[in-house]
Amino acid sequence: MSPRGPGIALAGVGLSLGGTKVLADVSLAVRPGSIHAIVGPNGGGKSSLLRCLLGQMPHRGRIVLDWPGEAGRIAYVPQALQFDTGLPMTVRDFLATLSGERPAFLRPRPATLARIEAQLEHMGLAGKADRRMGALSGGERQRVLLAQALDPAPDLLILDEPMAALDEAGARMIEAVLQELRAQGVTVLWVEHDLAAVRRLADRVTALNRGVVFEGEARSVLTPERVLDLLSHRAAA
Ligand SMILES: Nc1ncnc2c1ncn2[C@@H]1O[C@H](COP(=O)(O)OP(=O)(O)OP(=O)(O)O)[C@@H](O)[C@H]1O
C-alpha cells in the first residue's frame, strides 16, 4: 500500500532551554509510512525533539513534513498527561471535548457518545466512560490518550513512551495498533525505552543523546554493545 503518512526531514535542529543545550545539530529522515523509533538515555532530548516537531519549541534548523498529497491528520500521545486530578471531568467529557465537534458546555451528540463508547472498547476500557479522569490509573489514562489519538484515524502518529505505564496486555495492545497503522501506511514516530519492543516493531531507529549517536535498521543496529554504550552514558554534557 502506498503511504498516506508524510516523510519527515530534520536538518541541523538545535534547541537551548534555560541556558542548557538540549539538542545540537540533529539531522534525521523518517520514511513515509514507516515506524521510526527514537531511543536514548533520560534527558537525551527525545521529548524535546517531538515538541520541536509539533511546533511547541523555538528551535533552530529545519523540520519539513513531506505529505504524499494534502496535509493529513497529526495525532500526538504525550508521555504523561499533566492535569488537576481533582477536576470533575469524566472520561466521556474529556473525549467529547477533544472530539471538538461541539463547544465543551453543550451535551455531545448521540453519534459522538456512541463513538466514544467504541473508542473505549477498542482500548480495553469498556464501562469506564463515567469515571473521573483523575480516578483512572496511569495506564488507564494512557489508554484514554491513545483512544483520542486514534479516532479520527491519524496519518502521522507521534508517541512519547506509550508503553511506560501499561501492563503486559496494554503493551501488546499498542503493538497490535502499531502493526495495524503500518499496514495502513501511517507514519509513526515513536519515543521508546523498551528496546526489545523497538527491535520487534520499528523499521528504523535513531539513537539520540542531544545529537544523533547512531541510526539504522532497528533489527540490526541495536546491538548489545551499542545499547550498553548509549544507555550507560548520562545525557551528553
Ligand atoms: N523547559 C525547560 N527548561 C530547561 N531545561 C529543560 C526544559 N525542558 C526540558 N529541559 C531539559 O532538557 C533535557 C532533555 O529533556 P527531554 O525531556 O527532552 O529528554 P528525554 O530524552 O525525553 O528524557 P526521558 O527519557 O527522561 O523522558 C533535560 O536535561 C531536561 O532537563
Image (cartoon, grey):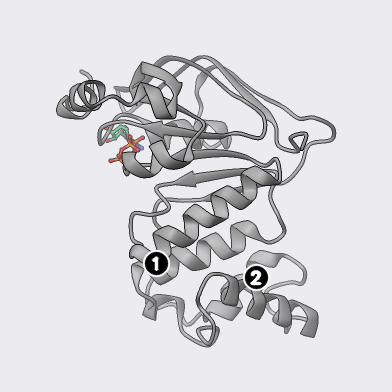
**Residue displayed at 30% across by 29% down:** 44
**Residue displayed at 66% across by 26% down:** 7
**Residue 106, position in %: x, y?**
73, 81
**Residue displayed at 59% across by 71% down:** 122
Q: Quadrant of residue 113?
A: bottom right
**Residue 35, position in %: x, y?**
55, 37
Q: Return the residue nearer the eye: 212 or 182.
A: 182
Task: Check disc 1 and report the residue beneath it.
Answer: 169
> SS of the residue at dot 2?
helix
Disc 1 Cβ-to-ligand 1 distance below 8 Å: no
Is 67 left or right of 82, judged from the image as shown? right
Q: Return the residue nearer the eye: 100 or 36.
A: 36
Q: Quadrant of residue 84?
A: bottom left
**Residue 170, position in %: x, y?**
41, 64
| Amino acid identity at mark 1 | Ala
**Counting other residues with Cα less than 10 Å from the Cα at mark 2, is it few (<14), some (14-19), or many (20 or more)?**
some
In the displayed structure, 101 sits above or below 130; it is above
